[in-house]
Amino acid sequence: MIILKLGGSVITRKDSATPLLDHENLSRIAKEISDSSYDELIIVHGAGSFGHPYAKEYSIGEKIETEEELQKKKLGFCITQNSVKNLNSLVCENLREHGILAVSIQPSSFVVTKNKRIYHANLDLIKKYLDLGFVPVLYGDTVLDLDESIKMAILSGDQIINYLGEKLKPNRVILGSDVDGIYDKNPKKYPDAELVQVVTSSEDLESTEGTGTVDVTGGMGGKLKELLSLAEIGIESQILNAGHDNLVKKAINGEKGIGTLIKSKKK
Amino acid sequence: MIILKLGGSVITRKDSATPLLDHENLSRIAKEISDSSYDELIIVHGAGSFGHPYAKEYSIGEKIETEEELQKKKLGFCITQNSVKNLNSLVCENLREHGILAVSIQPSSFVVTKNKRIYHANLDLIKKYLDLGFVPVLYGDTVLDLDESIKMAILSGDQIINYLGEKLKPNRVILGSDVDGIYDKNPKKYPDAELVQVVTSSEDLESTEGTGTVDVTGGMGGKLKELLSLAEIGIESQILNAGHDNLVKKAINGEKGIGTLIKSKKK
């Protein structure tokens, strides 16, 4: 089993203030997936410009102090949920047009978080879809949170990857990002920043404070944290640039040395 | 709590061979819901032209005899799922534009059937959305079926109504259809057909074999069966014409004598 993340920064124009698909990237990646070989595949995609502008505008996941704030956040929840669902429709449709039997799985229909971390999610149905040869497609979404002070949360695609990885024990996790991998320092600030081949601990790095774009779901630091916790239970992952031709395809096919490998020290 | 069904024949152009929204009806009904008063509301909508043409083309829910049939049905599953999800997006967006905090709940993300009847569906999340004041919006969808001979099934909005009714014990169930209610015989065949005010058993009726349009999810006979089984556990429902102005609003507000009432004999 492979779990593939498609970053919102890859499949959408993340700098757009309104939802905008990167149709070219999406179609190319769909073709790459279609041309590669795998036994079982789960795809998780980010929200990009379909989610982040709304999540930010309505501060979903932040403490609710007044009834007015609650009402505003509830409206924001509905707007964000519908927008990311629309992105998921476009992704699933595009995948299907490339011959991939993509089945949409809506996180807000079966996941609850507690203090922004997944508290409950029944994965039996996802296993059944896999057994039948479907490719489940999950995505960053708004979800209910059991913490009374926030009530709602943004569930990032990266956290979904972490949860699925932990529960389903995939052979590999591939994170398709808009950067080549993990750098020793921010490459947009430091021209001498170098791509790190293997990361085994967050202490390996001088700086992981961000990728230079605003990402409410945590930027590269957040991604790395999720992947390092998978590495600790023996699940290797790689971060690569899905914006470059054929890297997703090569990674699915098992080619080594692309991007950054995240694995446990113990191995 | 009120559970409101919006028939696919009301919110879509059901006679269209391709997905086509009845935007006028949908907007009018959204406004009626917005103008009415309720404590808790769940909306379930049908698929109409967004689902039935595909479900029929791919015969989802029929016995699978060959690997070729399985592959074809899996493709049909993906196409149908995405199309009804698109309808749900349009419905939720329209409801929200009318001030209703509509949250989409995707049945194929949490429901499995066995021999075409709901076998498992955790409703805890729906209760949580209701507690927070959201209006969960479910819909007729494709789902996985535990019966190995069919593997996939069409879950009708009417069956969802029945299941939610049984589990959540709403005060009332309102079924917004494109006909005035239940007739003693098919009004499209017999000019002397009369609207039945109260139905307490399917034996009350001379004929319920259909409403004159092809409805793969059972037509009026199927709807009535679902509602009669709710009546048996004490939950009253009414079938009314949601194509007519203000009937949905009046029914939500508790007005009696609209359409056909389905209730238990024992009462």
Image: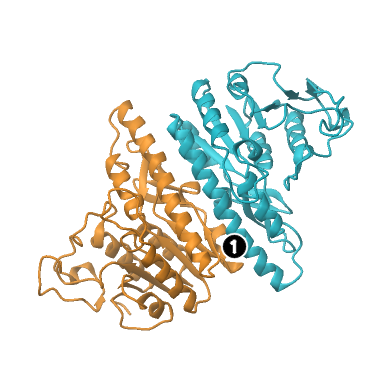
Chain colours: A orange, B cyan
- What amino acid is found at the position of numbered circle 1 in the picture? Lys
Left or right: A129 in relation to A83: right
Between B252 and B52, which is closer to the camera in this rendering?
Answer: B52
Where does the image place residue B112, in percent across and percent down from the top left?
63, 53
Left or right placement of residue B159 versus residue A240 in this view: right
B209 relative to B96 in the view: left or right:
right
Percent position of residue A18, x then y: 31, 48
Q: What residue would you read off at disc 1?
A: A128
Looking at the image, residue A68 sits to the left or right of residue B142; the answer is: left
Q: Is residue B69 above or below residue B265?
A: below
Task: Tell me where residue A21 sits by quadrant.
Answer: bottom left
Comparing B105 with B94, the one in front is B94
Q: Position of residue A261 (x, y in %)?
A: 30, 76
Q: Which residue corresponds to the image point at 31% horizontal and 45% vertical from the top-left?
A: A55
Q: Residues within 10 Å of mark 1 (few under 14, many from 20)?
A: some
Q: x, y percentage for residue A264? A: 31, 74
* Quarter occupied by residue A177: bottom left
Element at label 1: helix
Tell me: residue A210, above or below residue A170.
Answer: above
Residue at the spot 19% in from the left edge and 60% down from the top edge: A210
Can residue B27 be seen here? The reply is yes
Residue A148 visible in the displayed image:
no
Image label count: 1
Chain letter behind tag 1: A
Quadrant location of the C terminus of chain A in the rendered image: bottom left
Q: For the point 63% across and 22% down, which residue is it? A: B247
Q: Quadrant of residue A44?
A: bottom left
